[in-house]
Amino acid sequence: QVQLVESGGGLVQTGGSLRLSCAASGRISNYVMGWFRQAPGKEREFVAGFRGSGISTTYADSVKGRFTIARDNAKNMAYLQMNSLKPEDTAVYYCAARGMAESKYSIWGQGTQVTVSS
């Protein structure tokens, strides 16, 4: 089972951009990768992910057109490019993975804080 480590979080002004990275300890080609976030006092929510083993992606309505998920299987990396950031994007962002046959994400990183100032 791979381990995931996120990086790239930080403080940014409204309208700014950040790119989060997720480094896996092993091969991710057999995993479905996704990003989630949890704001203070709220439940963790899905942000973006890949559909199965393909390149098709899916996004939460709140981030469509602003965030882009990407992966580099050769480097065992996943990314989340976040543009036009809003204060409501402030949260801890988590990288996650699940096996192709699993219905739920079972592998989680430790999270990286993203704070968007108004």
Image (cartoon, helix red, strand yellow):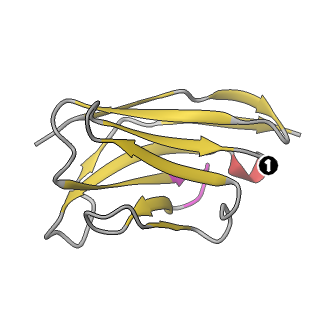
The image quadrant where one finds the N terminus is top left
Q: Is residue 112 shown above or below 65? A: above
The answer to whether residue 79 is magenta is no
- Dot 1, crowdedness within 10 Å: few (<14), some or many (≥20)? some
User: Pointer 1: what residue?
Assistant: 86
The residue tagged with tag 1: helix, strand or loop?
loop
> Which amino acid type is shown beneath numbered disc 1?
Lys
- In the figure, is residue 90 to the left or right of 104? right
The answer to whether residue 41 is magenta is yes
Residue placed furthest toward the left: 1
Residue 5: % across, % down: 34, 30
Residue 92: % across, % down: 54, 42
- In the figure, is residue 104 to the left or right of 80? left
Residue 60: % across, % down: 58, 68
User: Which residue corresponds to the image point at 54% horizontal and 27% vertical from the top-left?
Assistant: 8
Residue placed furthest toward the right: 118
Majority secondary structure of magenta residues: loop
Give the mark count: 1
The image quadrant of residue 28 is top left
The image quadrant of residue 113 is top right
User: Which residue corresponds to the image point at 45% horizontal and 52% vertical from the top-left?
Assistant: 35
The image quadrant where one finds the C terminus is top right
- In the figure, is residue 27 to the left or right of 18? left
User: Which residue corresponds to the image point at 20% horizontal and 48% vertical from the top-left?
Assistant: 29
- In the figure, is residue 1 to the left or right of 70? left
Residue 75: % across, % down: 29, 30
**Magenta range:** 37-42
User: Which residue corresponds to the image point at 27% horizontal and 52% vertical from the top-left?
Assistant: 97
